[in-house]
Structures are given as C-alpha cells and as structure tokens.
Amino acid sequence: MLIRLTRLAVAASLLASTALSAQQPASDPVDAVDPFIGTSGEGHTFPGAVAPFGMVQLSPDTHVGAARETYDWAAGYRHEDPVILGFSHTHFSGAGHSDLGDFLVMPVSGDAVQLQAGDATTPGFRSHKADETATPGYYAVTLTDPGVRAEMTAGTRVGVHRYAFPAGKAAHLLIDLRSIIYDYPGKILWSSVRIRPDGTITGSREVRGWAAPRRIFFAMRFSAPVTSHKLVSTEENILYKGFKGPGRGPETLDSLSGRALVAQFDFGALTKPLEVKVALSGVDEDGAIANLGSEPGDFDAIRDRTRTAWNDALGAVKIDAPKPMRTNVYTALYHSLMAPSVWSDADGRWRGPDDQVHAGTGFTMHSTFSLWDTFRAEHPLLTLIQPEAKNADFVNSLIASQKSSPFGILPVWQFAGKETWTMIGYHAVPVIADACLKGIKGIDCAAALRTMVASADYAPYGGLGDYMKLGYVPIDREPEAASKTVEYAYDDWTIARLARKLGETAIAVRFEERAQNWRNSFDPKTGFLRARKADGSFRTPFDPTAINYGSDYTEGNAWQYSWFMPHDQGGLFRLLGGDAKAVAKLDAMFDYDNSKIDYSHAEDIAGLIGQYIHGNEPSHHVAYLYSYAGRPWRTQERLKQIVDSQYKPTADGLAGNDDLGQMSAWLVFTALGFYPVAPGSNEYVIGRPFVDRAEMTLPGGARFTVVADALSDANRYVGRVTLNGKPLERSTITDAEIRAGGELRFTMQATPNTSWATTPAARPFSTTAYRP
C-alpha cells in the first residue's frame, strides 16, 4: 500500500548487509535478525531502535537534498544514502506514505553551530556516516564529520541516545523541531520547547500532515549538566540566549514557541559519553515526563531489557533453517512485531480521533493500524504468536477508537490516534471477527459486533450507500468501485460469521446476503471483475492490465482483483467454468508477458511475476488458490517461485513496501507451510514449508511444531503430510488444531505428488455458508 508520490531511481548496487548480526553465528533469535533488510529498494523499513510494539522508533533520517521528500524516503532513511540528518523518534516500518520523523536530534563537536535567526538551512544538521550496525532494540553509527560514535536504544515509551564525543572537543546537541519526513510549506503548524526548573527539556508540535492535525509531546533529560543553550525561531527572527550556569530557580524557566524552532545545548568537553533520554506522549508534556520516569535506568539497562523483550517475542517461533532463510524469516518476524504501536501513556491516558484525551480503560491503547494491508496475514499471525492480552489490546483499541470517532466508525488507516482515510474497505472488521472467532479472551464480542455493523452501515463512507442499495459500488459515483465492492463483500462475510457464532441470526442473514455482492461486479463473459455504472452497465473501454490510480481498482488491476473473494473461491471457480479453467487463468496470470506494458507511472507495482504483484497486498493469497482447484502441487511451485524472487537477506531484500508487517507476515506463514487465505474462516491453507523445523509457542502455552523432512532446493514438493503422526489428506489445517499443539510433519520430494489433497472434500473451505 502507498500514497502516490514522485519516485527516484534506486541505487544500482548495494552491499549484501551491514548489520553486525549477519556477520556472527546466530544463537538468540535477536542475533538472526538483520534490521537493514528492506531499508533500500521498495521495502521502506528503518534500521533504528524500537521495542516490540513500542511508541518510540528511534532511527536515523538520511539526506539527499530535495529528493528526500518523496515516496522512496517513506521511512526517512535509505541504506545507500551517505549522509545522516540526525535521529528522530517516530517512524513507520514499511509504509507507503511519508510522515513522522518527530524531534530530530544531532550531536556536534568542537565549534558550536552558528544558529542564525531567520536561517532555515543552518549547517551542521548532517554528517557522513560509517560503521553502521543494528540489532533489535539497538542501532549505532559513526558520524564522521563531528567524529562522534552515536548509539540508540529504545523502551516502550522512551528512546535513549548515547554519544561518544572526541576527547578535548566541546560537545553540543541540536534539537530541530523543523525537520519532518515528507515536508511541505505549512505542514508544521506550531512547536514549543522549554527548559523546566529541574533541567528537563519538554516540548511539542502540532502537524497537519497525513493524519491532521496531530499533536505529539516530548520530555528529555541529559546525563551531563548543560553549560549554556540557545533557542531559535528561524521563521520569526527570534534568538533567545539562555542561562550560562547551573541555576535552577523558576526565573530560569526558558521557553519558546513558533513554527520553526531549533535548540542548541552545550556541555563543554565531556570525559564520558553523553546519554540523552527522551519520552513521547500523545497527551501532554506532563504525560511525557511521567513516561520518562516509567522506564528507569541508563542506556545499557534499557538496551538489556529491550533485548530480552525481543528475544521473548521472537522466541515464540524457534526456527531451524540455513542461515539466509533463518535471517529472512526472523527478520520478517521482527518486522511483524513493530506495529500496532503503543499509544497510551503509562497512566493509561490517550488522545483519540476526536482530539480529546481519554482516561485509561483497563487495556493498553494502540494505534498505527495499516488495516488494508495487515488484516490479511499480520493480525492472524499475531493471534498465534502474541499473548491473548496483547491481541485483546489491539481489538479493544479499535473498538475504543470507534467510540471516540466523530463519525462513529472503526479505524481505516490510523496512526497517532488519528484517522487518515487511506485505502478502502472497513478492514478493522475482519481483524475483530478473526480474534473473536478464535476465542481470544478479553474482548466483549457482542459489543464488538455492534461496532462492526455500525461501520458497515455508514452510508457516507466510500460509496456504501449505493453498495447497500444496488449491491455494488457504481464507478460513475465512486472511484475504485470494483475494488470496493469485493472488499466490502468480504468484510460483510466476517460480520456474518461472528453474528452466527453469537446467535444474532438476523444480522447473520443480512450480511451473508451482502457477502455475495462480489458477484454483481464480476463479468462472466470476460472472466474478470469489472466496474459497473449506476445503470448496471460495465464501464468501457476495458483493459484488464491497466493500472491507473483512482480508476476502477485500488493499486492494481482486474488481474489482481478478480481473485479477491477469499470467502467464496468455490463460487468464483464455478463462474470461471470449473477447476481446470480456473487453473488455466491462474497460470495465465503468473505467466503473463509484461514486456509491452509500462507501469512506470504506478508506484508500488513491484515484485511482478507476470500479472501477479507480490509487492502489493491484493495478490498475496493468489498462489494458494491452486489448492482450491485440487492442484496443491501447483501452489507449491508458485510459492517457491515467489519466495526465491521476492525475499533475500539484503538491504533491498523486500520486493515491495513491508506495510507495517504484512509482507513479512506473509513470509513467516509461508515459511511455516500454511497461510490464512480467508481470515475469519479459522482455517489455514497448506502450502509447503521453507524451514527445516519451527516450533511455535502458542498463547495458551501449547507448542506446535512444523518439521520438513528432506527439505532442499531440489525437494520442493510435498510428498506426504502427517498431523500428530497420522496422515493428513486435506490441504488445510484448522486454528483449533494448531492451538491444541502437536506436530505437522512434511516429507518433501523432488517430484509433484498429484494425488495428495485433490478430492473436493480435501480442498480448502470455499463457500459462504456458515461452518462452526
């Protein structure tokens, strides 16, 4: 998923990796992770320090002039950039939109930077870099211009910097409240910074960016006394020279507000590294101060706690595989555990979509929900590898957001507690339904159902009024109508599933009928999903390969979207003329010759295999559809093709935006040998494993092990499958079977087994009828 911005050419060559972990034997799971994977190419990840689901993402921002304000710098960083601007405290991992990058900090040694009022391009806010290294919860780099070794770590609500300055040179710290990822005139509405009597630095800013307006607050403390400081507004020609001594009385409470603020803090020559501890809050400065105190300890103490937290989180899946694959899968698991991020303060308060502060409600509020992406595999993965309480936090956060929404609907694409209205569908619905249908404790599922129905019945949103009246979204009244029709239909099916479980028959029947609406935009004559007008006619001319943003489809074309009815693949196959014709169409998709098609205008159309686009989410379930036609060996072939071409342990090792963990979650599931084609079905489609052995520790404490006997590059086909020692003759496994614990064992071979899981009874669930 992305927002459409201008793109620059990617650097021609990259180092395989610079992460220290890639150079050492893997022991703990954290040592198998390479945070540099995805930091170049189309991945849009960042290498900096973050705790699992942490509020703070402390990471470098890099610089190549004005080009930085483009799609390729969505995470604020690119691995090949030689220059670092500084280190900011908020970043998206793998998003298709640029924003965040709050409160940039940069060390300077020797002569202080000459801050000039009215100067928006003060030199000194950048340095060349060398010797980068990263592991979960830790990042370090040498800033060669000031000669400073910079280290970063992070806790849940704090980030800690450590700067080793050259001996004998004065140490300075710059805080730039003007810097932001993807800047434009007027984006930063207001900023403030002040020095409190005890020496704590606090501040805030308000931004009218992607989610507008959003507020963010910080509190900062230093391990060494400040000898002098300067506060500057580069827009308003104000220069405030602060105290020159250790005075801490109320008369020394210095502050400045404006739209373009810079602060400089001077420390003299230091004999040991300077530590800078920073906490964030979405509520207020006092909340940031309280968050600062909620995680005691110095740099090393917080780094050790976060390393332990990552080892525990990653250790939920113990992986045995050759080093490149082990690195790929553990890094994918790492990227899957960054978001949704904590949003409430340590005292439970949080700022909602109504811009009001809400009191704690007995759970930890989270935000940063890229739901159009993550409902597919990311959230289903978290239900298996995270504690039930954490998954309940995610769902309860969505419900709490709905209650405080000015529109009374669930989040669409939310961060910092604010709605962006990005992408389509109401995909908080399948996340909630999937958790409730799996029996995750700590959720009021009856109340959740009411929030789901409220979103699905909100007529002003995205053509829903017409969808409810006509049975489809008309293209002459709403853009991207074909995509919206099928995505609404799937979401409706998950509502029906939960309603059936809760005994809400009337709701179930209504939404089961709506779940069939995908058929109203499917054209059996062409075999493609197409956009229809309000008069019922299909829009012409029609080109199934055309990708034009804002047209009939969302970030894709008819080839990708004609397969999106995961709740009724059997119905689709019947419309296509049966299994053989469905398989032929799948082959035509993967084997399509794109040599005469120019997709240079369409960002994020990456990772093409014919018309299959792995770099964007609508294609993610398609390789598994061969199993619905009784050809599971063809799924195995396509998965091998995708994994080999789309993932590698290098900086450019992700074919497309990671999208807050969805690309990564796809790999984790696929490496384990199964995938949630239809979240809400409580069923996973079996593919083939890519690791020799994996042991999952499930939320209830049971352990589920996957073993792949004779797995090799040559033995790419499944010959035999057993579940707890008994032959498994179907190409599915249920959520209950996994949660009960046990062993799923694959015997791999060099040739296809064309008799395994081919009968209709052995195929995946493919009807909208309710199934307990």
Image (cartoon, rainbow, N blue to C red):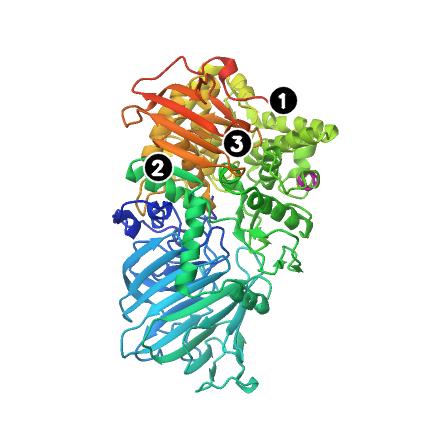
Residue farthest toward the front in the current orientation of the protein: 701
- Which numbered circle lies on residue 769? 1
Q: In the rendered view, would you say 272 is above or below 564? A: below
Q: Residues within 10 Å of mark 1 (few under 14, many from 20)?
A: few
Count of marks placed on residues = 3
Disc 2/disc 3 C-alpha distance (Å): 30 Å
Q: Please tell me whether residue 453 belongs to the stretch shown in magenta.
A: yes
Secondary-structure class at tag 2: helix
Q: What is the three-letter code of the residue carrying label 2?
A: Gln
- Residue under label 2: 646
- Residue under label 3: 739
Residue 106 x/y as whole percent? 38, 69
**Residue 596, can we see it?**
no
| Foreground: disc 1 or disc 3 | 3
Q: Please tell me whether residue 213 belongs to the stretch shown in magenta.
A: no
Q: Which residues are magenta?
A: 448-454
